[in-house]
Amino acid sequence: MPIRASIFLFCLVRITMAQLLAQEEKEKTTALKDLLSRIDLDELMKKDEPPLNFPETLDGFELAFNEHGQLRHIHTGEPFVFNYKEDLHRWNQKRYEALGEIITKYVYELLENDCNLKKEILPVDSTVDEPKSFIYMSEDALTNPEKIMVLIQGSGVVRAGQWARRLIINEDLNSGTQIPFINRAKEEGYGVIVLNPNENSLEVEKVPDSAKKPSPDASDEPAEKRERKEERENKKKKDFYEKYRNPQKEREMEHIPIRENSTPEEHTLYVWDHFISKSLAKNIFIVAHSYGGLSFVNLHCCNWVSSPEPLDTLVDPMLNDCPRVSAGTEKHELTSWKSFHSIFKFFRDALKNHEDESSSSPVTTRSSHRIKNEDL
């Protein structure tokens, strides 16, 4: 009996130890799953990331545009390098975006100083404190009796005067900006209006919830307790992630919409009603890239599209009243530049072959029969 009891006790101990080990392993697995669920992979990728502090000028980037309009390093003459730091895509992307903001301001300066365009603030009746947008116009945009040219870029980060930021940075100013179109238009006697459909809101730093004042109905005591609790929770989170994350944080931003210009469609209609429709020009010509053309596809037009076919080759149409022809390139962002000469020839032929039907009547505004943005 004593032997059997010993054996039974030994077996019981082994079973108990196995159960404890299994329970411990289960708890470790649960803890690991909980840890992994709370680790932000985006934050993990920020580990060892350099500060997101970038130059605010081309000189700061040690870059400049050469005589061919190409962006080059001022010492080596090399093109811009996106992967400046290997294995840090997020940091490289932020650096690229910072350069893009500088490029936007640089193009604005070219429009004003080299193209002699003037800035018009939108809305036209804006107050001092409200968010504003703007467009660019030549001096004769509203008084030219014969013809004006309206330029509209596609969607995204590009602003007035740009077709594609990537082309400006990696190719040259001619292919990436509207400047060649503006200069040729002025040479051929057009007035010029440059739209800015992507400037739809004012970006400001978001005020943290903890910085907001408590409501008048809330007593001081609950607010203090709530703040202390939030501080404790924030400290716990900070301590927990300290070994996994980089302490740098981006500012949280919010966007305040610009009145009557809060979308590309609103902007286009606003500029039509307040500027284009008031022009004295008998003929209005519109050059619109990508999404910028949606507001005008129902007018007499020609659509140069990316295609492997030679320039001006007719391709399958999407709309019966808007022929599609090849731009001579398969790169969408290059379609406007590659069809540059064909576009101006199309305009010249249109002037030559069509009699002016609107000389005795003003241009119709869209406000009188405005359609919803969703229907554009």
Image (tube, rainbow, N blue to C red):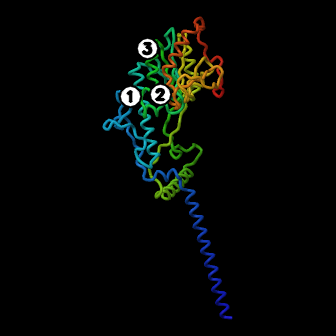
- The relative height of residue 5 versus residue 233 in the rendered view (above or below) is below
- Mark 2 surroundings: few (<14), some (14-19) or many (≥20) residues within 10 A: many
Decide if residue 130 is in sight here.
no
Reading the image, the residue beneath label 1 is: 69
Q: Considering the numbered disc 3 on the image, is that residue within a helix, a strand or a loop? A: helix
- Picture coordinates of residue 87, whole percent (x, y): 44, 49
User: As drawn, which residue projects farthest toward the right?
Assistant: 1
Given contact means CB atoms under 8 Å apart, are the residues at marks 1 and 2 in contact?
A: no
Q: What residue type is disc 1 on?
A: Gly
- The relative height of residue 102 versus residue 208 in the rendered view (above or below) is above
Reading the image, the residue beneath label 3 is: 187
Closer to the chain start, of discs 1 and 2, is 1
- Mark 1 surroundings: few (<14), some (14-19) or many (≥20) residues within 10 A: some
Q: Tell me the residue at 49%/36% (across/down).
A: 204
Reading the image, the residue beneath label 2 is: 162
Q: What residue type is disc 2 on?
A: Gln
Q: What residue type is disc 3 on?
A: Glu
